[in-house]
Amino acid sequence: MMMEYMPDRYAEEYVQGVVETKPRALDQKDLRMRELIRVTILKEPWAEEAFAKIHEEQISYLRDAVQHLGSPAYIDGITQETLRKIGTELRATIEEGEKNLTPLRSKPVLVMTNHLGAYKLTPINPQVDLGDEVPRYDGYDFMYPYLLYFAALSPVADALGNALSYTSIDYPGIFGQIHTEAGFIHVPPPSLVSRGRTETLKQQTAKVIQRRPNTAVVNFPEGGTGGKYDEAGPYDLRDFKTGGYVIAAELGIPILIVGQYFDTHLGMRLKVFDPIYPQSGTKETFECLASDTRAEIQAWLRQKEQVQTIVA
């Protein structure tokens, strides 16, 4: 086993390596995706009001977390509370497959889900929105707060009796520290760690589960927002990467597949598919699992889009 990678999140090289991975306010691909998600999701007044409230809740969360750095129990508590609040604002509901959660209650699971970009509706400028007590990082004046990435999965975690965690590209400095103290898993920037990233993520996942065995760890196998990089839409899934399947197999934890779709009238709809219990295998084995998972979620999303079109 490789040595555990322990970054100095406040080192200038590391901070800049992380900042380089983050979206920019005027990035044309990101601007296109933000607008497409806006017109897809914010069609009803209730949704506009909900996302405005979520925007403020995330700012309040980060301000509170900054004030309590070094107190992981406190940050963990406000994290789980805010995730549930956001899930409620989204009207997140398990629409299909809740029975699939029963055998997994209070057990660690890896949740595979589509990378829906609703979080792009609540960007902040940390240098402006979070106050003078937050350090300034060169080039980092645009941020998507983390919680909206995966807060819609709160009903799944509640039904399991689990806390929520997730995996993401790391954040610079103080934001990365909050990320870890909240019980989240970070992906080191590829410019600094080009090999062994799956092993690094496996080690972190094992630690999170050891700290709290009843954790649902959310994984986005697309590795980025659906549609952003290929001029497609938010429900056009990219190919799924295999790292999460390898990690689940090696740690002996089940994979729970969940689809996310935002119904403009009802809110976030979730479908829980049959769980997967991956075993160690070849690269081809994991690629088949990833392809099958993607196909299942994509078919359900297409069905939801057709229904939404008819209702509209």
Image (cartoon, rainbow, N blue to C red):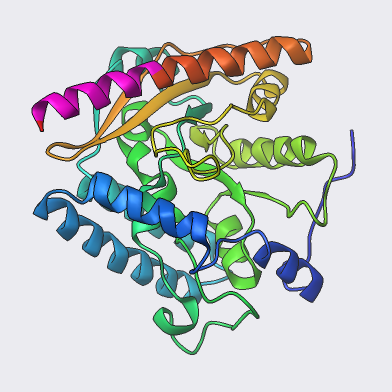
Does residue 212 appear to the left or right of 232 in the view shown? right
Above or below: residue 244 compared with residue 255: below
Q: What x and y, as percent, mark residue 24?
A: 54, 66
Q: Is residue 163 or residue 304 the one in the foreground? A: 304
Residue extending furthest toward the right: 2
Above or below: residue 164 compared with residue 259: below
Residue extending furthest toward the bottom: 132
Does residue 217 appear to the left or right of 106 in the view shown? right
Q: Quadrant of residue 170?
A: bottom right
The residue stretch that appears in magenta? 299-311
Q: Residue at x 50, y 45 (%)?
A: 228
Is residue 302 covered in magenta? yes
Above or below: residue 71 compared with residue 141: above
Quarter holding the C terminus? top left
Q: Is residue 44 or residue 194 the one in the foreground? A: 44
Q: Residue at x 56, y 49 (%)?
A: 184
Quarter holding the N terminus? top right
Is residue 195 covered in magenta? no
Would residue 77 be visible to someone looking at this image? no
Q: Is residue 16 or residue 256 the one in the foreground? A: 16
Q: What x and y, as percent, mark residue 218?
A: 50, 36
